[in-house]
Image (spheres, helix red, strand yellow):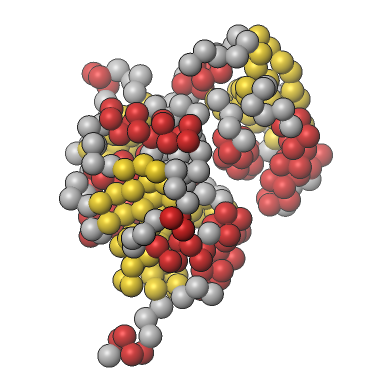
Amino acid sequence: MERPSNWLKVSIHHPPDAAEALSALLFEEEASGVWEDLPDRLGRMVTRAGFDVSARPGLEKRLPEMIAAVADSFGLPVSEFEHSLEVEVNHDWAEKWKEGLKPISVSPGLAIAPTWWPEDDQPEAEVVLKVDPGLAFGSGHHATTFLCLTLLSEMAGAAASILDVGAGSGILSMAAAAINPGARVVGVDNDLDTIAVAEENAALNNLPGLEFSGKDLSELGESFDLIVANITLNPLVGLAPLISARAGDNGRLILSGLLQTQAEEAAAEYGKHGWQLQSRLDRDEWSALVLARVQTAEAEE
């Protein structure tokens, strides 16, 4: 694909605690690359991102609202954040971003490595998935992705069918398929560009049985033993009825994309749809929840 000539460079100076949240939101805005630069003279972290100007013309207006929301989530003064935007020509932001991506080990059985990482320096694990995140947020480095990968390492082996909601780069779908080759694994995403990235990654890892789809959850006519959704609070809440409908009678959910301060709200919302919290895993300021269906007294007998 030919790159547009003009790119919008976004620079955000911010307190360290907000780094992961800002990176996640910038990727949700379809950044082509996000990376951390050297701290500024006040000791604040500097997060930069590259955007296709023609694809996101309203970003300039949304940035202040996004930054204010992050500041509020962490109880930080918005005055501690500064941002700037400037248009540059023919800068390969995705290549710049690659410099900061290294292999990660999730468990003795699972590791993730970028496609460009040297073959003679691969991590040691039973399964090493190769991933080219492209425009999709899913290299395994973000805390929520790591949490979901950790839980999949523990839970995917016992599931005959697994659904990945908001598949992105396909990293969670691929991990599930690699951990349990006999399972039916489906990844869904409403962004067809990310579906293309996911399909390419599945091909790189020789996972031909893995299915990716742009279908809405309401269009899927089957139920799943395990559903993983690594999105953010608002979509998780909005999709609660549809996710619940796609889960089998003894199904379980892995929900992430949640700040620790949002975990209880998410669990309570899914409680309205017949789910109870089984466990919670935290990393940095993020959480992942494991939910199971509430068993009625009749079912327990």
The picture places residue 235, in percent across and down from the top left corner, at 57, 54
The mark total stands at 0
Q: Is residue 43 left or right of residue 159?
A: right
Q: Is residue 129 left or right of residue 72?
A: left
Among the 4 quarters of the image, the one containing residue 62: top right
The picture places residue 200, in percent across and down from the top left corner, at 34, 29
Looking at the picture, does residue 190 appear above or below residue 37?
Answer: below
Which residue corresponds to the image point at 39% horizontal and 50% vertical from the top-left?
Answer: 164
The picture places residue 44, in percent across and down from the top left corner, at 69, 31
In terms of depth relative to the viewer, which is nearer, 258 or 183?
183
Which residue corresponds to the image point at 44% horizontal and 48% vertical from the top-left?
Answer: 215
In terms of depth relative to the viewer, which is nearer, 214 or 88?
214
Q: Is residue 83 visible?
A: no
Which residue corresponds to the image point at 48% horizontal and 16% vertical from the top-left?
Answer: 1
Among the 4 quarters of the image, the one containing residue 206: top left
Which residue corresponds to the image point at 66% horizontal and 13% vertical from the top-left?
Answer: 6
User: Furthest residue to the right?
Assistant: 79
Q: Is residue 22 visible?
A: yes
The picture places residue 251, in percent across and down from the top left corner, at 34, 67
From the image, which quarter does the C terminus lie in?
A: bottom left
